Image: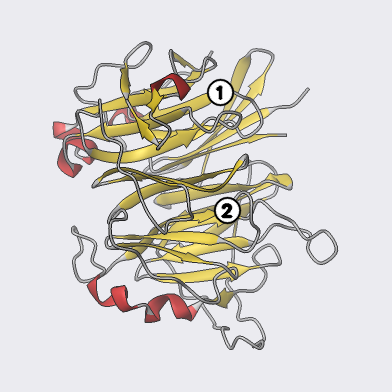
Amino acid sequence: MATTKLMVAMQNSVLTFESSNDMWKTHESLRGTSPQCISFDPSNPSRAYCGTFGNGLYKTDDGGQTWASIEMKEKEDDSSGSSTDISGTAHVMSVSTSHHLNKVKNKFNAVYVGTEPTAFYRSDDGGESWNKMSALNTLMSSSSWSFPPRPWTSHVRWIEPDKTNANYVFAAIEAGALVQSHDGGKTWIDKVEGGPYDTHTLATHKNIPKRLYSSAGDGYFESYDYGESWLRPMEGLHHHYLAGLAVDSGDSNTIIVSASESAWHAHRIDDANSHVYRSSAENVYDGKGEREWKQVTKGFPESHATIISVLAANPKIVGEFYAVNNRGIFYSTDSGVSWKTLDGVEWSKDYLLQHPRALTVSNG
């Protein structure tokens, strides 16, 4: 029977939850490292990567029980001329693994890392060596990238390897652009007019090539042509600052987003007020991607004093979603209609004052 594992990047540590006989075993690790992002390797369920703010990149090969710091070594130059030594890179803001594995050449899926200041790196050997994909920083829009709390800099907020095309990868810059590469990061295509400015989470779907879902500070966006054009279906979304997003692994029209009135109400514990919305096939109309959103409340704590939720879908179980915020970790088995707390999991008082940064799910 497959085991479901969750990893949560809290402010001060990583929490690992593993399903066991209708209960969940919990383990805490990487205390004091300021985790920011986390990703499982789809082809190696025990391998995961965690990026931190100030402490670099880590990997685990035992499902989060122990971690080792990755020394980001320089790779021998190749024909692209995109090699570098990034052993000093400390502020890792995004990490993601490809959904496609070349079993002849590779043992691990490709790993993508985004940093602050904005830079993009790729490893094809499980983190042993790295290439800096410098073309990202030559895009015309790069001169305008700026992260409001630290306006002198920017970072790669989210990396989304396409689930249907191994060569396509998308990068969301916070703040200022959603850009894409069609050759694994060697060259880049700049943002387009009318697209999201401040994407926090981007998703693709294994069943629908060319479709993009963006949960952004400037609202919700969808594209059906790999981002050449965008729709902004906002009907029913009474809160327009979005952060989390998850799409049902078996149904490309069932989408969950987390939202708030503003960045302040989303992220500041003293003024936190956040919400979760859902849209599904019955909420899509006119065949042009227009949709309606319904607020979800069943099983969630009250919105007041709740930090905006980080969301994830189970990649192998249709209709199963997970959410984490400062009030706890929650799951849904009915496509996001109703939610419960994880069985047997006690939420420490210490976590009530923390802002979860990332959530990843493995079922293997």
Task: Answer with left or right where residue 214 lies relative to residue 361.
Answer: left
Q: State whether residue 258 appears in this view.
A: yes
**Above or below, 170 relative to 242:** below
Residue 37, image x, y percentages: 46, 50
Q: What's the amino acid at mark 1? A: Glu
Q: Quick one: 278 or 78, which is closer to the camera?
A: 278
Q: What residue is shown at x 32% (from left), y 63% (from top)?
A: 177
- Residue 65, image quadrant: top right
Q: Nearer the viewer, residue 109 or 33?
A: 109
Task: Find residue 50 and report its horizontal and vertical position in percent.
Answer: 52, 52
Q: Which mark is residue 67?
A: none
* Residue depicted at x 67% and y 86%: 76
Secondary structure of the residue carrying numbered label 1: loop
User: Which numbered dot is residue 162?
Assistant: 2
Q: Quadrant of the C terminus?
A: top right
Mark 2 nearby-residue class (10 Å; few <14, some 14–19, many ≥20): many
Find disc 1 in the rendering and name its residue: 320
328 lies left or right of 175: right
Q: CA distance from mark 2 to mark 1?
A: 21 Å
Secondary structure beneath label 2? loop
